[in-house]
Image: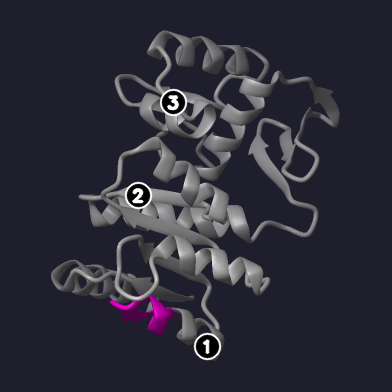
């Protein structure tokens, strides 16, 4: 698997590159957005790790231009931005995830693994959640033993966030960002997650006390 890394902070760029190489990835790193953009048309990359504020062409513009050229590559933004409008901008441009600086490199590894799993699904886009439960990402259809489980919109959105971050704990703050796009009471998040869990067999969505929720496969 080959990764393009765009990060203009030298020490962080080197640390990320060395870590990813050590765990088996090929990595090309850049500090300039325009140079990274050109490289994407010269080589094939399986994943893009993009800082937002970089010289020449920022990460948002780079991904926007790639989408115009019909280049669809799973993308994770690396950013110190915490403003919800910036987060919305990233998803609008087509990223599959973001990670806020500073971050642990092992967390980055988990996010990369999940990005690959979520983006490169099987031909029918069917995700097996265990316990005879499947979710069709194309049709937004949850099934137990081939019988549909009807979900409300918030439950569907919560499930898709959990699937996107499969094998990673999803915190209340992540649900707030990715489902509601703004602050909501933690109690509201818990109620909606519990509503989803009640529709599923035990163990599909697991609670990590004090941390959040996870789907493990």
Of the numbered discs 1 and 2, the one sitting upstream in the chain is: 1
Q: Secondary structure at mark 2?
A: strand
**Disc sitting over residue 182 in the figure:** 3
Q: Which residues are magenta?
A: 27-36
Q: Where in the figure is residue 29, as x and y percent of width and height?
A: 32, 79
Q: Where in the figure is residue 66, as x and y percent of width and height?
A: 58, 71
Question: Distance of mark 1 from mark 2, alpha carbons?
Answer: 25 Å
Taking the magenta stretch, the answer to whether it contains residue 95 is: no
**Disc sitting over residue 119 in the figure:** none
Identify whether 142 is placed above or below 62: above
Q: Does 105 sit left or right of 91 as displayed?
A: left
Q: Residues within 10 Å of mark 1 (few under 14, many from 20)?
A: few
Which image quadrant: the C terminus?
top right
Q: Residue at label 2?
A: 99
Q: Residue at label 1?
A: 43
Which residue is painted at 62% across and 66% down in the image? 67
Q: Does 60 sit left or right of 22 as displayed?
A: right
Q: Where in the figure is residue 211, as x and y percent of width and height?
A: 32, 26
Q: Are marks 3 and 1 in contact (CB under 8 Å)?
A: no
Of the numbered discs 3 and 2, the one sitting upstream in the chain is: 2
């Amino acid at each position: 698997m080959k990764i393009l890394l765009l990060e203009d902070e030298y020490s962080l760029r080197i640390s990320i590159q060395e870590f990813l190489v050590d765990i088996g990835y090929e990595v090309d790193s850049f500090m300039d957005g325009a140079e990274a953009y050109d490289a994407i048309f010269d080589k094939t990359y399986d994943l893009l790790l993009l800082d937002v504020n970089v010289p020449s062409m920022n990460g948002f513009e780079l991904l926007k231009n790639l989408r115009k050229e019909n280049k669809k590559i799973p993308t994770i933004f690396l950013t110190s931005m915490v403003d919800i409008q910036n987060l919305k901008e990233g998803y609008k441009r087509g990223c599959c995830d973001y990670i806020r600086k500073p971050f642990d490199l092992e967390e980055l590894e988990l996010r990369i693994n999940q990005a690959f799993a979520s983006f490169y699904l099987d031909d029918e886009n069917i995700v097996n959640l265990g316990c005879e439960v499947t979710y069709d990402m194309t049709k937004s259809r949850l099934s137990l033993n081939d019988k549909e489980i009807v979900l409300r919109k918030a439950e569907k959105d919560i499930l898709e966030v959990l699937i996107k971050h499969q094998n990673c704990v999803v915190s209340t703050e992540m649900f707030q960002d990715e489902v509601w796009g703004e602050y909501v009471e933690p109690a509201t998040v818990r109620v909606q997650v519990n509503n989803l869990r009640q529709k599923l067999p035990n163990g599909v969505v697991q609670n990590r006390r004090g941390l959040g929720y996870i789907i493990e496969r």
